[in-house]
Image (spheres, rainbow, N blue to C red):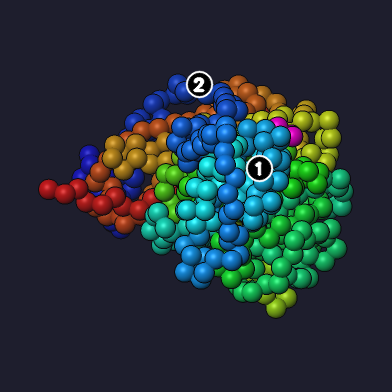
Amino acid sequence: MFKDFRNNLRPRRLVLLILMTVLVTWVILWLWGGPAAPKAKDQILQISKNTSATTQDRQPRHRHTSPQTTTQSPVASPDGMPADETANQDAHIVFLRNSEDYQRLRDWAAANGFDPIGEIPQLHALKFSLSAEDFHRLLQDSGIELEEGLDSLVSIPDLLNDKYPEWTGNPGPAFGDTYRAFLGVDIDNPERGHGVTIALLDTALFDHPALKGAKVTSVNRQDTQDESIATHGTAVASILTGETGISNAELLAYNVLDTETGNGSTFDLAAAIVDAVDRGADLISMSLGTYDDSGILHDAVNYALTNNVLLVAAAGNNGVEDVCYPAAYEGVLAVGAIDADGNVSGFSNYGEGLALVAPGVGLQVAAPHDEYGYFSGTSAAVPCVTAVLANYLSANPAVTPAEAYARLLLNCTDTEAPGHDTVSGYGILDAERLEGQDDRGIYDAAAAGITYDDTTGALTVAAQNTGTETLAELVLTTEILGVQMVSTFKDVTPGSIVSASGELPPDVWENALSLKVRTTVSTPDAKDARPRNQTHYKTFEAPEPAEN
């Protein structure tokens, strides 16, 4: 039969007709298992997020306890050091137990020539630039118990190649200017996002027509040294708000990344998070990351969460199973990227910490010289999520941030493996479904994930009830190599995911370099409210030949 299946791919006349008939019968038997449809599998939402590092895995803080009785000795100011000693200075972050100890060390340092280069009183943290010898003197002579932490580099995700090689592949089809329609954003509503403040932590912004009319306040603004890097923050801002943006929320823009290198420090990022919280931000958008865990960054995230501020961050663009920080921290929405076909792009990092995916390939955004360009990466996906949340919080002021977090994930559209998975999290961001979750009378079915395991040959196709009413009948049609197969599911409740699976024979790859699968859903007993999500495509490349 497998040989006949291969011959079915060749253009023959009578033989082709016979074999197509055999193929249809055979595939229906092995893939759909006859007339008995599998039961719908309910989607289960787990709010707690597993991160890629435990508390013990974070960069350690080294506790230092100074003698209770000390002899004060003059310490030379770092400013008076010879050039060779200044070159050997390192950044040291120190954490104090409480506000009293923080102020004591702050006062002692000022009196003894140890001026900090950064301070975050809310976290009882100070940052010094000192040689190892002078830092030892500070520890010994201050007489104050403290903990020491490390400052790490944080970067635009595309620049995070210090740990993993740069991803080089085909990201998938571009969204262009269709990402708002894809998400179901009501762009005709001028009040969307009204009364909500988003803090954008990125590069400095430059003026652009896309941001005309947007309410943007730049905090600690700097001159742009390299407009190509400054484009990153401006591109993100143009997705968040303005003429091309998803929301009309107010923007607080922090330049935490240098426009010359695209890099910053976790201490400065932590300081910006704390300042944004104190200035009244409702959401913090971070299209940046690091692979190094950081005590100061973790404390800043907890500060935001304690103050009911939602954080959204990029998973990373290396295509590896390792979600970047701060996205990997508990309570932060870690965002991956999809292409215009609704498939997760190969560059998008994944893992247990991933929350959801959003448009991240070829979004049309603000570019230098008042022009528009195309922006790809998990950096582009982050503002999609942040802006949709801003719109939802604006329209639902009684909803708490924790409730918004949960409802956002519960109303994602499933993709990849049925249910929650490490590649797409809870699925694809869906603004229209989030906004309409409490509206009765919505009948809607979505073509969901299509997965293929090239080790076992298992192909799985899925669909989801993305409406608010039970579907008496949901029909899932799959087309493979010109052959259509139909499976019918009964009484599919809202949010439920249904699926069918089977094994493709290895021989199929002898006549094809790729396999394109198309799925379509329909609701015979009710008019589908959103035809745009009824079809899904995915192409699988032929697996590598097994080694002998």
x 60%, y 45%: residue: 72
Q: Nearer the viewer, residue 191 or 155?
A: 155
- Of residues 73 and 373, the one nearer the viewer is 73
Q: Amino acid at mark 2?
A: Lys
Q: Position of residue 540 (x, y in %)?
A: 38, 50
Give whichever of 454, 200 is nearer the camera: 200
Please identify the quadrant where the N terminus is shown.
Answer: top left
Residue 464 badge: none
Measured as percent of width and height from the top left, residue 360 is found at 58, 55
Identify residue type, mark 1.
Answer: Leu
Residue at image x 77%, y 54%?
252
Determine the image quadrant of residue 306: top right
Q: Mark 1 falls on what kind of element?
A: helix
Mark 2, residue position:
39
Q: Residue at x 72, y 61 (%)?
A: 238
Distance between the alpha carbons at the discs numbered 2 and 1: 64 Å
